[in-house]
Image (cartoon, rainbow, N blue to C red):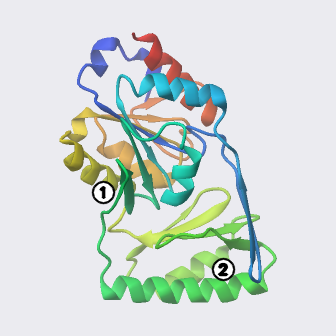
Amino acid sequence: MKLFSSLKKTDFKNIKLISFDRDGVAAQEGTKVIENGNTLTMTSSPLRPEIVEKLRKLKQKFHLNISSGKSVLYLSRNYSDLLWDNLSLQGEIGIFTLYKGKVHQHHQFTPQELEKSRDIFLALRDLQQKSPNLTGFEPKQFLITLHCQQKDPSVESLVKKLDPEGDFNCFWSGEAYDISPKTSTKATGIKHLCQLLGFDLSQVLAVGNDPNDQDLLNSAGIGVTTNPESAQAPYFTEGKQEKGGEELIDFLLSLG
């Protein structure tokens, strides 16, 4: 693993697409969800105006993609200042892409996947209503995101019980569990986006910080992690999390 600053301008000559994770890379990490009956409160860190302006400049040179576990609706509101040219938004860990005003669904769920996902959600909902550690679910179409005050073994054991075949991922992000079929990941999402844009994976620079970014970092032409303890890549930033993300954006802008 090398510092990303060791890369030279010539290393980026074939890069056409830059994919950023949102939380902890393009924005400060931290989303709080509190669900109480029919009332749901969700708070997260907005994009700083300085980052918006830097991304606006960067997308004049590259196609930018935000690859996130968040819903496409949330991302479209969050990145409204940067829509629509040279920007795509991928939500729910690669299931959906919003590009030029159209939402593309990349994974067609099988009846078995839908049934298992439903059973897992209903069981987790019952568990959440009984445990003060489990604060609530983010509103999403397919990805199950259950927020917790701290990592909870009961969530992991319940998913294993209902998914003995191991068909689903159950990622712990440090604030929530993301649960979805292994057939749909950020890597599959970026592959579909490359087909849509006419790019090759070798032309992708991916920046991530969490376990759910790992397959994307492995697939991209250049992979950079802002948190080597949680996600490994050939290159890493000196700054941690969103500080590393901004560090990389500044570096790319400095290349001219």
- Which amino acid does the dot numbered 1 rest on? Thr
Q: Residue, x 50% and y 89% (percent of image)?
A: 119
The quadrant of the picture occupied by the N terminus is top left
> In the image, is 79 to the left or to the right of 213?
right
Residue 188 numbered tag: 1
Within 10 Å of disc 2 (Cα), the crowding (few <14, some 14-19, many 20+) is few
Query: In which quadrant of the rendered view does residue 130 lie?
Result: bottom right
**Viewer-proximal residue, 226 or 136?**
136
> In the image, is 157 to the left or to the right of 147?
left
Q: Residue, x 58% and y 47% (percent of image)?
A: 78
Spot occupied by residue 148 in the image (x, y as percentages of width and height): 72, 67
From mark 1 to mark 2, how far is it between C-alphas? Answer: 29 Å
**Viewer-proximal residue, 216 or 97?**
97
Query: Which is in the foreground here, disc 1 or disc 2?
Result: 1
Query: In which quadrant of the rendered view does residue 126 lie?
Result: bottom right
**Mark 2 lies on residue:** 154
**Viewer-proximal residue, 91 or 104?**
104
- Which amino acid does the dot numbered 2 rest on? Ser
**Viewer-proximal residue, 214 or 73?**
73
Spot occupied by residue 97 in the image (x, y as percentages of width and height): 37, 55
